[in-house]
Structures are given as C-alpha cells and as structure tokens.
Amino acid sequence: MKRIPIECYEILSNKLNYNDVTGDFTWIKAPRKYMKDGQLAGCIQGWGYRQFTCKFKGKRYQPRAHILAWYMYYGELPNGFIDHIDRDKDNNSIINLRDVDRSLNGLNRDEYKNKKNPTGCTGVYLINGLYRSTITYKGKQHQLGLYKTKEEAIKVRLDYEIKYYGRNFNKSVKNEGFQK
C-alpha cells in the first residue's frame, strides 16, 4: 500500500463530517450529482475496510476510514497501526479504535485451525502428544511450558497475554470476550 500524504487527510477532513460515537462519515457537500449532502461517505473495499478517494498532486489515494477517524478526532496521524478493538473493520467509532504496534495489532485477529496449528489457539501447539504454550513479546519468543491438556496450555497462554498485553486476544477460546 502506498503511503498516503497527510494533505489527503486534511482535504477529506474539510469535505466530511465524522461522528465519533457512531463512526460514520457523511458528506458536508456531496461531490457528485447522484449523491446527497449528509449521505454516508466512502465504500467498503475487498478487505472489509471503509475507504475514500482523494486526489492530490495529480495522484489518486485511497485513505482508510479508521485512520481518517483518528486524524479527525486527535488532529494527528497515529504512531503505529489503528486496531479495531471489536474486530469490526467498519466500526470506526473512536472508542473502538486504538493506536498500537504491529505485534499487538496482529494479536487481535480471528484465529482459525490450520495444518500448522490444529489447536485453534495462537501460541498453543501439539508436539509429540503434549501441548506447548508460547508467546512472543517485544520480538522475543517465550516458552511457557509443555502441558498434558490443551486447556492447561491455553490457560497459561491467556494468563501471559494479560501479563504482557493487559488483556487476552484468543477469541477462539471460550473466554467471554475481552478480559482485563
């Protein structure tokens, strides 16, 4: 993805209203005849994020709504990545957005079972009949131990997520949502 100049965020900030409670963007003055003033702006692209189109210095850019929301609310671009806390890529309410590093952003995603990790839990792997629990924090992988049951390994992993990150992120496990 090409870097989007800050001027695009400034241009869009002057053309759109942002509702920080609902996360919706609406046109102040509709840019096309088939649109109406106050109409919901932007479109959902293939990855599920709402985006806009901005022309600047003869080039076309497509900033994403969550970054624009951050810019319009705080008056600056984020330092890291904007994470949707509830994982709804079109929920751009400011309380659902946070500025995080790559590592933390990567943790807040849907987990799925695959050939490499049939446990369905990030950081828990079946090796020679035992469950290994690991976590990566600040670029270093920590071995949390080997356990007889998947449930034991998952519990240790979740405890360390809370220790290192302040909450757990493994939604594939019955943990009743976000825990602190």
Image (cartoon, helix red, strand yellow):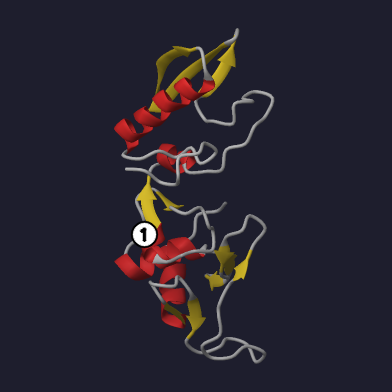
Q: Position of residue 110 (x, y in %)?
A: 56, 43
| Left or right: 4 as drawn, with respect to 119 | left
* Marker count (numbered): 1
* Residue at 51% over, 90% down: 29
95 up-or-down from 144: above or below: below
Q: Position of residue 169 (x, y in %)?
A: 44, 40
Question: What kind of element bears circle 1?
Answer: loop
* Residue at 48% over, 40% down: 106
Q: Position of residue 112 (x, y in %)?
A: 62, 36
Asked if one can make out residue 75 in the rendered structure from this viewpoint, the answer is no
Residue at which label 1 appears: 77
Residue placed furthest toward the top:
128
Could you tell me which quadrant the C terminus lies in? top left
173 up-or-down from 116: above or below: below
118 up-or-down from 107: above or below: above
Closest to the observer, 77 or 175 = 175
Q: Position of residue 151 (x, y in %)?
A: 49, 24
Residue 129 image-quadrant placement = top right
* Residue at 69% over, 25% down: 115
* Residue at 61% over, 25% down: 117
Asked if one can make out residue 170 in the rendered structure from this viewpoint, the answer is yes
81 up-or-down from 164: above or below: below
Closest to the observer, 11 or 83 = 83
Counting other residues with Cα less than 10 Å from the Cα at mark 1, is it few (<14), some (14-19), or many (20 or more)?
some
> Which amino acid lies under the numbered mark 1 shown in the image of this protein?
Leu
